[in-house]
């Protein structure tokens, strides 16, 4: 919109959402059973149906996972409107983690029929944050049977940045104070006199940060053995931000370790946490991109990530190999944390900054839209020609039908007049 384009957004009906002339948060939806903070639309509703049918759109962008594919995509294909299907979640991974047996088979079957099939059949372009995920997620993408694109991604550089060393020191002190207060409150509640690990945070303590949903697929439990291996070598304290179904289990596993759970924190409060941390860690190999990694790097905080197809595509050769660990390999994660927490790690990142702004991402996405529109022009011309021919045929048929009816009506009138003339005397 800032670049002069008209953009209409239809989204699931959510509490507290604001209606505007361009934002329509009123699609019928249901809660995502694997992430109850998110909703999925299951019906287009009257308003979206009207908008799709009544107006001429240059591009329709459908965000997956969505149950709207069977309605939106055939309609757009019939109207010769190019569609951009962006895939953001590996739902099949959730099926593997949370279901088994017949439930898993039914889930994958319906996921294929309701989600994947319409996207591959009628989508003009299928896109994801990484090509490797798209190839793995959609079989036709890997075989070259689909037009594909990589979704440009960025961060708000005015928020996620590293302004100065003084700023980082202030934010680190604030975080340390918060950790100390949090632990003191817990100790008071438990009525115990034992000292907490966070009370021993000193200048040389390396603050480790994890920001993610606390769920099995994130594999957060892998970090705890690494903390034990680092004991006596590197003084560390781990801060975990987020909530989810595995929270209680993770807290139990973290007992006796220098770990603090801060719970759910608004996105607006994350940049100071990234800057205050010495190292950001993720153990998840289920990401389609891993936006928190990019946010941390934008704040010039070194990251520790696992080897997997997504992170290898994004970061191999762009980050030091020592920051990337082999999941399941003994000491690999601990060694990566030690390497990333080295004082030279942040210096390296400041000298080799990762730049990915939303401005650049927006320009790239607009270019993808423009390419789609240009690519769709021959289809649109054929569609217009076909519609015009159909309109002419319908007019000819209508005129012919009108003449046919008129001719027979005139014959009937003449016959009726003769009958009346013969029946009425004189």
Image (tube, rainbow, N blue to C red):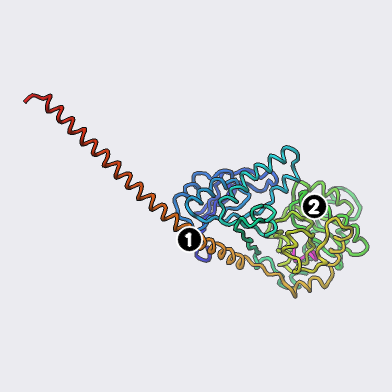
Tag 1 secondary structure: helix
- Between 109 and 206, which is closer to the camera in this rendering? 109
- Residue at point 67% right, 42% down? 109
**Among the two numbered marks 1 and 2 on one chain, the one whose residue lies closer to the N terminus:** 2
Q: Is residue 217 magenta?
A: no
CA distance for labels 1 and 2: 47 Å
Q: Which residues are magenta?
A: 273-279
Q: Quadrant of residue 181?
A: bottom right
Q: Residues within 10 Å of mark 2 (few under 14, many from 20)?
A: some
Does residue 278 belong to the magenta stretch?
yes
Residue at point 75%, 43% (across, down):
98
Relative depth, front residue between 173 and 405 = 405
Q: Callout 1 environment at 10 Å: few (<14), some (14 to 19), or many (20+)?
A: some
Residue 377 — which label? Answer: 1
Looking at the rendered structure, the secondary structure element under dot 2 is: loop
Of 363 and 251, nearer the camera is 363
The reply to whether dot 1 and dot 2 touch (C-beta < 8 Å) is: no
Q: Is residue 42 left or right of residue 96?
A: left
Residue 108 locus on image (x, y percent): 68, 43
User: In the rendered image, which quarter contains the C terminus?
Assistant: top left
Q: Which residue is mark 2?
A: 219
Which label number is shown at residue 174? none
- Relative image position of residue 305 (x, y in whole percent): 78, 61
């Amino acid at each position: 919109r800032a670049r002069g384009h008209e953009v209409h957004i239809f989204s699931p009906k959510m509490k507290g959402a604001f209606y505007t002339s361009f934002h329509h948060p009123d699609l019928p939806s249901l809660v995502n059973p694997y992430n109850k903070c998110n909703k999925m639309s299951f019906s287009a509703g009257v308003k979206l149906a009207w908008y799709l049918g009544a107006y001429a759109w240059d591009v329709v962008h459908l965000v997956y996972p969505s149950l709207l594919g069977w309605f939106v995509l055939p309609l757009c294909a019939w109207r010769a409107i190019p569609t951009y299907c962006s895939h953001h979640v590996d739902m099949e991974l959730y099926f593997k983690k949370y279901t088994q047996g017949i439930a898993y088979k039914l889930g994958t079957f319906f996921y294929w029929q309701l989600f994947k099939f319409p996207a591959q059949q009628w989508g003009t372009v299928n896109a994801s944050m990484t090509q490797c995920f798209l190839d793995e997620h959609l079989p036709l993408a890997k075989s070259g049977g689909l037009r594909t694109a990589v979704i440009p991604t960025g961060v708000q550089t005015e928020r996620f940045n590293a302004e100065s060393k003084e700023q980082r020191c202030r934010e680190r002190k604030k975080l340390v104070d918060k950790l100390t207060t949090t632990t003191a409150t817990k100790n008071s509640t438990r009525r115990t006199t034992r000292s907490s690990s966070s009370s021993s945070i000193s200048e040389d303590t390396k603050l480790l940060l994890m920001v993610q949903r606390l769920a099995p697929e994130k594999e957060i439990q892998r970090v705890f053995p690494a903390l034990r291996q680092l004991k006596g070598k590197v003084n560390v304290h781990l801060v975990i931000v987020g909530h989810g179904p595995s929270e209680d289990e993770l807290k139990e596993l973290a007992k006796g370790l220098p770990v603090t759970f801060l719970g759910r924190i608004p996105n607006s409060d994350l940049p100071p946490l990234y800057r205050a941390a010495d190292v950001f860690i993720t153990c998840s190999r289920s990401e389609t991109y891993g936006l928190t990694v990019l946010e941390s790097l934008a704040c010039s905080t070194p990251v520790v990530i696992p080897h997997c197809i997504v992170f290898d595509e994004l970061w191999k050769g762009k980050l030091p190999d020592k920051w990337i660990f082999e999941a399941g390999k003994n000491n690999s994660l601990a060694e990566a944390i030690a390497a990333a927490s080295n004082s030279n790690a942040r210096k390296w990142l400041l000298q080799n900054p990762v730049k990915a702004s939303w401005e650049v991402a927006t320009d790239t996405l607009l270019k993808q839209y423009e390419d789609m529109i240009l690519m769709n022009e021959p289809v649109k011309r054929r569609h217009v020609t076909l519609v015009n021919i159909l309109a002419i045929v319908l007019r000819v048929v209508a005129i012919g039908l009108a003449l046919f009816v008129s001719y027979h009506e005139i014959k009937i009138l003449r016959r009726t007049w003769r009958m009346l003339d013969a029946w009425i005397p004189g």
